[in-house]
Image: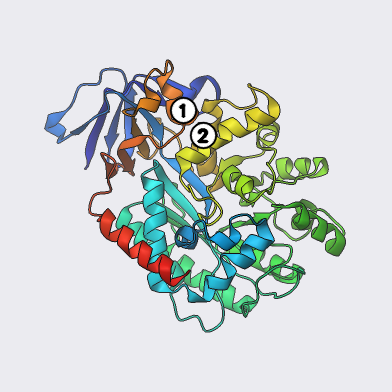
Amino acid sequence: MSAVLVKGADAVLTGHAGEEARAGAVDIRIRDGVISEMAPALEPEPEQGEQVLDAKGCVVYPGWVNTHHHLFQSVLKAVPSGINEQLFGWLGAVPYPRLTRIRDHELETAALVGLSELLLSGTSTCADHHYIYYPGLDAAMADVLFDVAERLGIRLVLCRGGATEVGRHPGYPNDMAQESLDDIISDVQRLANRYHDPSPRAMRRVVMAPTTPTFSVSPDVLRELAAAGRSMGLRLHSHLSETTEYVRYCREVHDMTPVQFCAEHGWLGDDVWFAHMVHVEDSELPLLRESGTGIAHCPQSNCRLGSGIARAPEMARLGIPVSLGVDGAASNEAADMAQEAHITWLLHRALGGANATTAEEVVHWGTDCGARVLGMDGLGLLEPGKAADLVVYDLDQPRYFGVHDLAVAPVVAGGSPTVRYLLVDGEVRVRDGGIPGLDMEALRARAAEVTRALA
């Protein structure tokens, strides 16, 4: 049995909301991947073979739970032709012209870059929405992603994307040959059989996740995908209401709002979450609340593409599950969760006033709420009985000097705090700002070679 004691932290945030958000200066004892005890001044137990991790001068958070990513985009950052484009122009300039050129080698490189960036920001769980699928593709894309995640020791939720329609939305730049309904369902079944673990502390999960419910598949196919996913015990995920154009199309073609459309086709529920949800109407909020449907709030990407700002604080107050996602690095060149949390805290205060969001609330969204949106009840909180997914942030940079309330420094001061330790299921995956076993210079060179090839 593994035994770890995280000792001497200046402050611990638990991931809870409200008064339980702060645990104070407590030590954290871990046994076999699970938190067993939290209290001040715990004594080491060398007879148990306990490893002591020194957290003096640090603050401890739960590991971030990133609920929406596109890892393949980690080698498509700041492409000049798309840097000043909105969503459809950016899609047509950056990812879609390159999708058929991304195979196993390119995806493995991108996943190593993206997951390393997440780990070094304190992230322990990543939900990746992968949608590079088309007939004749000879690459085992999802298997590559799971393999890289296993090597780095991060939890991976694979949201298996795809589309069965071409040209349904005028102006949408996807001209790849599309899959059939049977193609998608059979591959999701294969992935579920091989990888999906329904347990609360799963390292691997699979999700049914067509690229966009309102125009990547037909309404009948959308219903069948929901039924097939649920029959396998899988959750459902997709993009929704990212832009005003998205909402306009849904009203003109389907004569209803996007959330109403999803309700009509079996795509609301406490097993469903949508990325973005930037343009949600008042009439849609009760549907989301009553169904328990969650959102992955991606403020940096939404700002970068000029899409708008989701009503996340209002949704959270209504009881709609709000989590955080970094989205793809091609539309969010700093795809790390610490930076996402910092922008979240600032953005909503600019809109709604200085009390619109608190640092503790943002941590709650990015940890506990993220785990609940993914249906992973064993994660997301620092308390006995939960998985030992935690990040020890070293406040060793000048931007954190002079901070009076150290507990919130990583969120309110921003930047990229040094990760002294990141534990995932009790195992050290980052130590002193590095990932054990990963040659970062070799990865840098490999990423540069792939980036040149995809220029």
Q: Is residue 69 left or right of residue 28?
A: right
Residue 47 in the image: state x and y as whole percent. 12, 31
Query: How far from the left and from the top, in percent, is residue 318?
Result: 71, 33
Q: Say if 126 sits above or below 254 in the image.
A: above
The answer to which of 119 and 213 lies nearer the viewer is 119
Where does the image place residue 156, in percent across and percent down from the top left? 43, 55
* Residue at point 83%, 43% (across, down): 283
Q: Which mark is residue 383?
A: none
Q: Say if residue 143 shows up in the picture.
A: no
Q: Residues within 10 Å of mark 1 (few under 14, many from 20)?
A: some
Q: Is residue 275 above or below residue 173?
A: above
Name the residue at 65% across, 29% down. Answer: 350
> Which residue in the structure is indicated by mark 1?
413
| Residue 96 placement (x, y as % from top left) | 59, 69
Give the label on residue 342, or none.
2
Disc 2, SS = helix
Front in this rendered view, residue 134 or 28: 134
